[in-house]
Structure formats: C-alpha cells, structure tokens
Amino acid sequence: MTEIQAGTGVAETAAPGSQQVPAIELDNVVKEYTSHGEVVRAVKGVSLSIAEGEFFSLLGPSGCGKTTSMRMIAGFEDPTQGVVRLHGQDVTSVPPNKRDVNMVFQSYALFPHMSVWENVAFGLKRKNVDAAEIKRRVGEILEVVDLTGREKRRPREMSGGQQQRVALARALVNRPRALLLDEPLGALDLKLRQAMQIELKRIQRDVGITFVYVTHDQGEALTMSDRIAVMNDGLVDQLADPREIYERPATKFVAGFIGTSNLLSGVVQEVTGSTAVLALGPSDRVVISTETPVAVGDSVELTVRPEKITIATEQPAGDRSVVRGTVSEVVYLGTSNNYAVVLADGAEITVFQQNAHDSTITAERGDTVWLSWQPQHSYVLR
Amino acid sequence: MRTLRARLTPYALVLPGGLWLAIFFVIPTLVMLSLSLQSGNVVDGFAFTWNWHSYVDGITTYHNQIVRSLLYGLSATIIQIVIGFPVAYWIAFKGGSRKSVYLFLVLLPFLVSFVLRTISWQFLLSDNGILLGPLKSLGVLPQDFHILATPYAVIGGLSYNFLPFMILPMYVALERIDPRLLEAAQDLYASKVQTFLRVVLPLSLPGVFAGVLMTFVPASSDYVNSSVLGGTNTTMIGNVIQNQFLVNQDYPVASALSFTLMALLLVGIFVYARALGTEDVLEVAAR
Ligand SMILES: Nc1ncnc2c1ncn2[C@@H]1O[C@H](COP(=O)(O)OP(=O)(O)OP(=O)(O)O)[C@@H](O)[C@H]1O
Ligand SMILES: [Mg+2]
C-alpha cells in the first residue's frame, strides 16, 4: 500500500477485480422527491460500481440518502436522473419483480399470515420452481441461517434475531445476484447485533453473493465491509476500503464521522519536493505530503488519528511532525490512557496511549507536552 | 389490598356495559324466549305451556319468507363485497392525505335517516320516476317495465343501506397492511396480481369477515326495504315478524319466528367462520 494515494476521488476508485463486469453500477444517479410542493434532493449525483461478490457498505448519517440509493438499486424508486446497471444491463426502468436482486428490509417485512416456511418459499413459488426443488432449497437455506425445526412458526412467534434470519433466508433462497440489506441489524440489541454481524459475514462468504449493506453504524461498516461508500447529504464523500477510510479520511466530514479524529489547521511555510511544512505555533512543525498540491501561504486543514500520536514531556528530535500544547484532561481507561491536549491556537487534540509496557502516566493535567507523529499520518482534507 | 383491588378492577370496568347488556339484551331475550313457548291470545292473556307448536306453525307457514330473507341477505352481502372492497382498497392505498374526507363521504348518507334513504330510493325507482320515466318516453324501456316490487329493488336497497358497514371494517383491515409487505412481495418476484392475491387479500380477510357479519345479519332480518321497495312477492321474515307482533298480536309465533331466524343466523355465522378458519382470521386480526 503506497502512502501517496491519500484523498483519491470517488469515481476513480476501482472496484477490486475490476476486469469483470460490475455487479451493480450507479451512474450519476439523482433522486428528487416533491413533498408539499417543495423539491427535496435526496440523492444528488452518486456514481459507484460494486464488484461481484463484494461486501459493500453505504455508510452515513440519518437522511443522507442511503435508503433512497438502495431503493433505486432494488427498483422501488425511479431515479430522477442517471442510470442503474445490474451486471452491465441498464435496468433503470425495470420493475422490482423483474430484477435479479433481493432486499432485506429494515423492519424485515415478513408476511404475518404465512409460516416461516411459506415466507421463505414465497419467491421460489413466484418463479415457478418445482415443488421438490423448493423443498430442498428452503430446507437448505433454513439450515444455513440455523432455523431448522422452526418451519411452522409464524413470524410473530419468533424473536427479533430469528425474524431477522427468516428475512435473510427469504431473500437468499432465491440465489439473487446481489442482496440489498437496509440496516438489517438496526432493531437488535448490541449483543445480538454483534453476533449477527459475524453471522452475516460468514453467510456472505459461504454463498458468495454480492452484499450491499446500508448502515449508519461506522463500527459495523468498518468490521464487515470490503469497501465502504461514505455518504453525506446525498453525495458520496469517499469510497474506499475500511482501512483507507479510517486511516486516510478524504474529507473533513469523513474524518469527523469515522472514529475520533483530530483536526489541525495551519499555513504552508515551505514546499520542498514531495513534502511541505506547515506552521502552527512557534515551536511547531507539521510535515505534509504535497500529493494535493499546495503553495506557500496556503491555509491547510489536516487530520491525525489519536492513536498515531506520541506524547512526550520533552521536545522530540528527528523529522516527526511536532506540536506543543497543554494537557487539559487525562482519562485512565485500563488498556489505554486518553489525553486531551490544547494547542496554542486553541485546537483540542485527543491522544490515545496504549498501556502496553507500563501504566505510568506520561503527563498530568496542566503539563506542557510535545505531541509528535510520523509525517505520513497527517492527512490533508479536501 | 392492592392485589384485591387489581383483581377487581377488570370487573368494575366491565360493570356498566355488562349491566346495559343484561337489562336491554339478556332480559328481553329471555322474555321473548318464554313468550315463544306460551299459548293464548291478547284478549285472554298468555300462559307458559311449553307450547313449541308456535315454532312448527311459524316455520311451516313462513319457510318461504325465511329462505327468501337469507337469500336476499346473502345477495346483498355479495353485492356489497363486490362494490365495497374496491372502494375500501382505494381509500386505504390511494387515499393519501384525504383518507378521512373519503371515509366521511362514505358515511355521509348515514346522516339521513334509514327510512328516509329508503323512501328516496322508492322515489328514484318509481314506475314513472326520474330514472324510469325518461327511459320509457325515449322508448329504451317498455311502458310496463318496473323495478319497484321486484326482488331487485329490495336487494338493491339492502345493499345500499348497509354498504358503509361493509366498507369500514374492510378499510380498517386494509389500512393496517404495512406497505412494505407489498414491496417485499414485489421484491420476491410477485406481479401486481399475485401481490394482491397472496398478500393483500389474505390480510384483509378479517375485515371482510367483520363486514359480512355487520351486513348479512341486519340485511336478512330487515323489513324496511321490503315494505318500502318491495311487493307481495318480496315479503321477508322481518315483515312477517313485524306483522305478527304489531298487527296480528300473535306474540308466541312472532317470538318463535325471531328465535328461528336468530338460530339460523348463528348457525350460518358459525359455519362461515369455520369455513374461513376463524383461528386464522382472529390470529391476523390480533396482530
Ligand atoms: N418519499 C419521500 N418523500 C420526500 N422526501 C423523502 C422521501 N423519502 C426520503 N426523503 C428524504 O430524502 C432524504 C434521504 O432519505 P433516506 O431515507 O434515503 O435517508 P437515509 O440515509 O436512509 O436515512 P436513515 O439513516 O435515517 O434511514 C431525507 O432527507 C428524506 O427526508
Ligand atoms: Mg434509511
């Protein structure tokens, strides 16, 4: 992994195995709703391409257009503009029952008047699969989701987690070429949620189907996905793998939305080849890459993850980025210490210090400290 | 103390309604049951004699009217399902923000008295009235054509008068269907027709069931429609009972006929519920 690619644009990020025809493509898709005479732009031009077999997440805060994007893939909404392609075919005006994708609804939407078995067999029956085959496939998929023996139950006689698995089985049994999941774990408690995350990932690996996963839970997206599209107000801010999203957030929004991040700003003092030096305070020196071109005098915003920062009571030597500040808070968390440090310009920086060697606290409240990190851990924000 | 109170609370809550039912339903019913087994006449008075001949006489004399009432009730019910279901469906799924306006329109005729509404039908359908008159003078219909005093007029009146009782429960059931279920069905390759047959229809059955109860029972025991819109060939059992009570004052036969009708309706409802699978119906309703 080369460090120079920080902040790559959205559309250029190629899907893994990009030689193949992508399973799902959104090409500059826009969706506008009219409600009470006012036009709401729910999706403002999203382009993405999802590879066959990929676990792809749409991540973003409430109202950013995740569900709308997914519903356009499923066919429940017609895009105002743009094209939806499934396996290279334009399906923009194909109704949902003719699309080879299945959806797992946030509220599961199980048919209350049907047993588990009837729910799961619903799609196969509509496709006129013969009875013996239906029986075999329903039995098989119920085994996969661990619901064998509960075929005769009604949805309302099952727990939330079980209903969730029925919903999953009902979609998977059709062997769709892609499965769309809209916050499928949203209604479950934390423990069940974590168990189901592992379960979902296992099932996805077993069946090898493309998963498109909508969530507003960054932890969930980071642990499960091959790639993530971080959405913000109807647009994709960054599309990359979880590591890249976390380590190199492309925008201020992504940096703020994913994990804890520190925001710094400074003016470019000198540019030498592939690096530039920023001036923050009198004894500060922050080195950035000039992959995003900068000139002397430019104002630049950058972000550093708290666990990349080393805290010291003496000014460190070498070519590390260094800033000076005052400790305003120390929190002992057992496995780590968290420091809040206020810089000369008032910016507050969070530092995580692992208690790997000893649990001595480096600095106390009010101490003057030097924070330092490797130059490649600074990410310039667009 | 608290547990005693907690245990008594449900009874306290049921008390007013329970008393109401006891006074105005159970007691009259028992009185009628006893009447149906009495013999005598208005002048000499009645005495309880286990005289079940009133039942035999009533049924043998009026079995035509009984069968006719059930047939008219059934026809009206079927017509109401056919007319009412699309209306209920349309309001529930396409009514948008104006649902309550449409429901109000469905209920609007109710603001006019039942008898008056029926009389307005008589006016509409009369032999040379505003409907038939012009058609006859245009030569579209023969001069001796008439609707009044035919079964069509009575069944039409019955269907019209009880229609809101059919539409409302069906609307409630349809309104409760989560639109995402329809999307889920579509997502699972169901066409519009299949979605309707496999999801909407089964989930609306409790409403249809309630609607049928609320219209079939009053329609088959009605007497207003047949006396205002019907003729001598359309007499329903309701007319007979009314006549026996108020004109002939043969209370035992009138009561016996009432009980016969009640028994027939109860059996009918029971068979109907069984056929539909009450358990399923109640299960969906209890959702
Ligand atoms: N049918 C609709 N009519 C009008 N506006 C709508 C409609 N559906 C969605 N919107 C608007 O579009 C925007 C995006 O909605 P969407 O449901 O896609 O958000 P989301 O990212 O899924 O949010 P959440 O995490 O809360 O589910 C919101 O501002 C929403 O109010
Ligand atoms: Mg949503």
Image: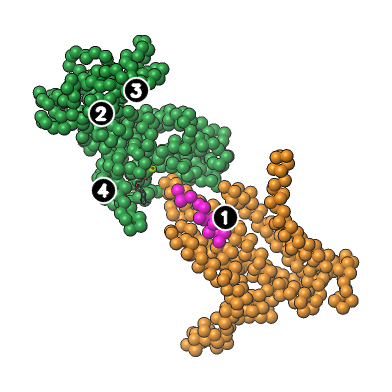
Chain colours: A green, B orange
* B98 up-or-down from B249: above or below: above
Between disc 2 and disc 4, whose residue precedes? 4
Of all residues, the one furthest to the top in this rendering is A357
User: Predominant secondary structure in magenta?
Assistant: helix
- Read off the residue under disc 3: A329
- Read off the residue under disc 2: A346
Q: Position of residue A178 (x, y in %)?
A: 36, 38
- Residue B154 in view in this figure: no
Q: Are marks 4 and 1 on the same chain?
A: no
The amino acid type, in three-letter code, at marker 2 is Gly
Q: Could you give the CA–CA distance between mark 1 and mark 2, rounded to whole angstroms?
A: 67 Å
The answer to whether A237 appears left or right of A98 in the picture is left
SS category of the residue bearing label 2: loop
Q: Position of residue A313 (x, y in %)?
A: 26, 14
- Read off the residue under disc 1: B205
- Magenta extent: B168-180
Q: Quadrant of residue B47?
A: bottom right
Kindly identify the residue that appears in the image at 56 percent across and 36 percent down.
A150
Which numbered disc covers residue A325?
A: none
